Every structure is written in C-alpha cells, then in structure tokens.
Image: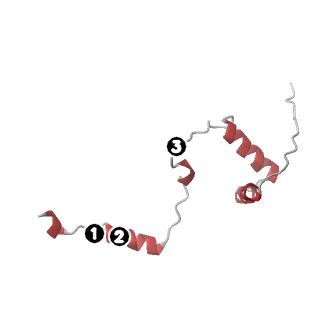
Amino acid sequence: MKKSKIQYTIRSVPDRLDAKLRETATEYGQTLNEASLDALKKGVGVGDLPALHHDLDDLAGTWVHDEATEQALDEMRQVDEGMWR
C-alpha cells in the first residue's frame, strides 16, 4: 500500500525561520524540504521521538568550548579555605 504524498505551500515565512531552516538543512546535509518536514514533525510531536518541552531544552547541546569562559569557571571553582574555618 503506497502512502499518500500531500504537498503544502507555506506563505509568509519569517526571515528568522527561513534562515534557521536553511542553516539546519546545511548542518545536517539535508534539502530545505527535508529540514522543514523534520521541524514540522518535531513541532507537532510525530517525529521519531516525541517533542519534549522543558525550560532549558533549547540550550541542550549548544555548549561551545571557550578558553576565556573555562578560565573564569576555574577561578570560580577555587575554594577559599579561610572562609570555611
């Protein structure tokens, strides 16, 4: 049994959304159509994994190593022994 392929025309796509879809397509080696379909599936919860929404989900996996940040974090991790006596 062959699955039906329905076509959509989506108008008035905001510039930011267009840019993000194109960036995602390039990043994952997809066509713009594939990236758009993946985003739609995820958004409505019918992708491979159901969409989960928590406060910081959009930040997951976005950490970029930065030497200055690492140095600042190392400095904050120092324990002042004099304060704990």
Mark 3 Cα within 10 Å, few/some/many (few <14, many 20+)? Answer: few
Q: Is residue 81 left or right of residue 56?
A: left
Q: Which mark is residue 74?
A: 2
For disc 3, the marked residue is: 54
Residue in the picture at 83% in, 51% down = 12
User: x, y percentage for residue 74?
Assistant: 35, 70
For disc 1, the marked residue is: 78
Q: Is mark 2 on a helix, strand or loop?
A: helix
Q: Distance between the residues labelled 1 and 3?
A: 31 Å
Disc number lying in front (3 or 2) = 3
Q: Which of marks 3 and 2 is nearer the N terminus?
A: 3
Q: What element carries label 3?
A: loop
Q: How far apart are marks 2 and 1 (CA)?
A: 7 Å
Q: What element carries label 1?
A: loop
Residue 42 image-quadrant placement: top right
Which part of the image, by quadrant, shows the N terminus? top right
User: x, y percentage for residue 40?
Assistant: 73, 42
User: x, y percentage for residue 63?
Assistant: 52, 61
Residue in the picture at 39% in, 73% down = 71
